[in-house]
Amino acid sequence: AAGVIQSPRHLIKEKRETATLKCYPIPRHDTVYWYQQGPGQDPQFLISFYEKMQSDKGSIPDRFSAQQFSDYHSELNMSSLELGDSALYFCASSSRLNEQFFGPGTRLTVL
Amino acid sequence: AQKVTQAQTEISVVEKEDVTLDCVYETRDTTYYLFWYKQPPSGELVFLIRRNSFDEQNEISGRYSWNFQKSTSSFNFTITASQVVDSAVYFCALEIYNQGGKLIFGQGTELSVKP
């Protein structure tokens, strides 16, 4: 069965650089979620999209933005990266009101 | 405010022992969902179960079982006859119905199963 695809799987950036994370949801899933998991922490909700519209927003820094495209894939754009942005970033997808399935995550390291 | 608490930070057992992971949640909403996810050392989050707030029936799936008690706001997870492959961090999570679907995670319990 198809799963959520995230790219890249690993990313190393310098402080103040920009990063773009991509997420390809499971086919026919209309909702995408982004979560950030710091080292030894639980995942924290960042933002979600339903049918290409932002549906909810969590603790997402203003330096971050995201969108969902017409093919339902989503991108998380992160600018002016800080050391504290180093984390595992998960994308999850669901069909409306059903359980979320998570991608393998993108491990971002900011040096 | 909604909150999920997993008081056990780490648990270590020997293979074939039974182990129960505790989860206590807080919410004033009457309609919600509870989840368990497994995060093995490779890092991915694996969905295990979803329960809605109106279904208190316990569930068993192979060596896994879940005990949902609204009276104590708990949703505990038991692994019977644990195996080394069960070693992982386990997260309990809460989703409030009709609030966009975001998951509120507990802090996680790291389970180590030794041979």
Image (cartoon, grey):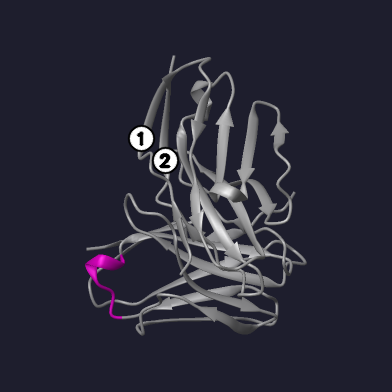
Q: Residue at x 57, y 56 (%)?
A: A103
Quarter of the figure with residue A97: bottom right
- Residue that numbered label 2 is attached to: B109
Chain of the residue where label 2 is placed in the rendered structure: B
Q: Residue at x 38, y 39 (%)?
A: B8
**Residue B79, horizontal then vertical, whole percent:** 57, 28
Q: Which residues are magenta?
A: A80-85
Residue type at mark 2 is Thr
Task: Assess whether mark 2 and mark 1 are in contact (beta carbons under 8 angstroms).
Answer: yes
Q: Of the numbered discs in the image, which one, if any, rests on residue B10?
A: 1
Image quadrant occupied by the C terminus of chain B: top left
Q: Residue at x 22, y 72 (%)?
A: A15
Residue type at mark 1 is Glu
Chain of the residue where label 1 is placed in the rendered structure: B
- A11 sits to left or right of A76: left
**Residue B66, horizontal then vertical, whole percent:** 63, 38
Out of B74 and A67, give the one closest to the viewer.
Answer: B74
Out of B20 and B12, give the one closest to the viewer.
Answer: B20
Quarter of the figure with residue A93: bottom right
